[in-house]
Amino acid sequence: MDYNWDFATIIQNWRVFWTGLQGTLLMFSVTVALGMSGGFIVGVMRYLKSPLIAWPARAFVEFFRNVPVLVQIVWFYYAFPILTGIETSPFLAAVLGISLNTMAFSAEIYRAGIQSIDAGQWEAGKAIGMSFQQTLRRIIMPVALKRVLPALTNRGIEVFKMSTLASVVAYVETLNQAKLIADLNYNPIESYTAVALIFFVVLFPVVQATYALERVLKRGDR
Amino acid sequence: MIELVRTENLHKRFGELEVLKGIDLSVSEGETVVLLGSSGSGKSTLLRCINFMETPSSGRVFIRGEAVGTERAGKLTYNQADLCQLRTKVGMVFQHFNLFPHMTVLQNVMEGQLTVLKRSRKEAGEKSLAQLDRVGLADKAGEYPSRLSGGQKQRVAIARALAMDPRVMLFDEVTSALDPELVGEVLKTMRQLALEGMTMICVTHELGFAYHVANRVLFLNDGAIHEEGNPQQVLRNPQTQRMREFLEGHSLFKLPD
């Protein structure tokens, strides 16, 4: 196959891609923050023994883990406004879909982390008069978070890539912008290759940095 | 003599299994009481009911004459904040040390003082060093627990409990997880505490410790106090068949005198 690559159009249109990348970064920041902080709360609820708290959390996790994010985004964009009368922007629909999914997955990561801590640690905290919250915050979480950091990193990478799903409701992000360029210039090969490259170039160094962070934290393990 | 700990008709059930079948115990200030008994006799559970690591199924616990929990419509309820408060007065040391691995020795001892007693960093730091000195480990203040031997870990755990200024200390088989050669240093620390007048309730299999240090020995069998008295009598001349069997099992392979 002799295809003549022509990236000149892509470079000329760098501003369009830049706008898209900004949208991607915004979507990632909001969804990863909401998903991983909300997931923490759900994860702790899952861990608690009271069925009144644990059961709703379990139902939440099972539901949002088993519904595709793409379906959720489309549902929040098209069905939710009709059912509730509340308009959802493409941004809001995508944030809801991706965040809820991230909450469900990260809740399970946090729960596994908490459960991996020896029960003796809870007892030791309790025995010196610490409350449940104090023990969780001061004794359990510092060790648990360190253990689940690789799993959370993986989830973070997934969340970053999931932002492209927002293009289905025409939210302005990298893939959406590439489609715009491709349609205008009839160069889908270069446009979508550019999207792949952009994601790789952004993610690869970040992932390397987190590996380094994990190594540093591991060295701290004595 | 001031009575520091009292239990009245204490029962504990785990589902169908009744582990404690009505324990009446009274411990005075400055006393060292050793709980003996085979595994499953309920001695650890009794200890854990005194600081409410386990909630008794029925019966009452009194700390310094004050009943723990409030009775409402014939049902005992326990306020979590009150229990946290109580646990600062009743220290506990565990078989498996349970030091906090992400904190240095000093931070381990400071933790409860900072988060629970709200002491200043300066005060907590000074108190911690004093307690570490008391167990002979002031020079290890900056180490992480994983760098310590089992015996050292256990002595740090003792210092951590002491730093809360408890009125009573509970020791739950604190030498059972240690290599034989490390048992001595922990028992020595405990003996020193007893001599300093600390009120102590110890679950242990170290009969020598019971004999030399305890003021009173309780032998638990099947969830009840089976035999009790001063260690010289109880350990030398057990009155019951069950207690004799227990002691024989312990001294079967003793070195000849």
Image: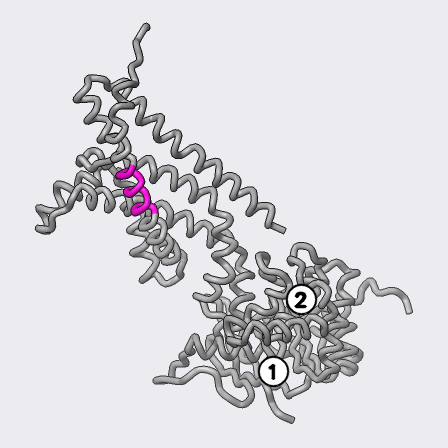
Q: Position of residue B185 (x, y in %)?
A: 77, 67
Does residue B134 belong to the magenta stretch? no
Quadrant containing the C terminus of chain B is: bottom right
- Could you say which quadrant of the image residue A41 lies in? bottom left
Write down the residue under mark 2: B156
Q: Is residue A109 left or right of residue A66?
A: right
Q: Chain of mark 2?
A: B
Left or right relative to B198: residue B8: left
Residue B7 coordinates in the image, percent (x, y) = 55, 83
- Classify 10 Å Cα crowding around label 1: few (below 14), some (14-19), many (20 and above): some
Which residues are drawn in magenta?
A22-32
Please, what is the dominant secondary structure of the magenta stretch?
helix
Residue A75: in sight, yes or no? Answer: yes
Residue furthest out toward the bottom: B1
In terms of secondary structure, where does tag 1 sit?
A: loop
Q: Which residue is mark 1?
A: B167
| Above-or-below relation of A22 to B24 | above
Q: Is residue A29 magenta?
A: yes
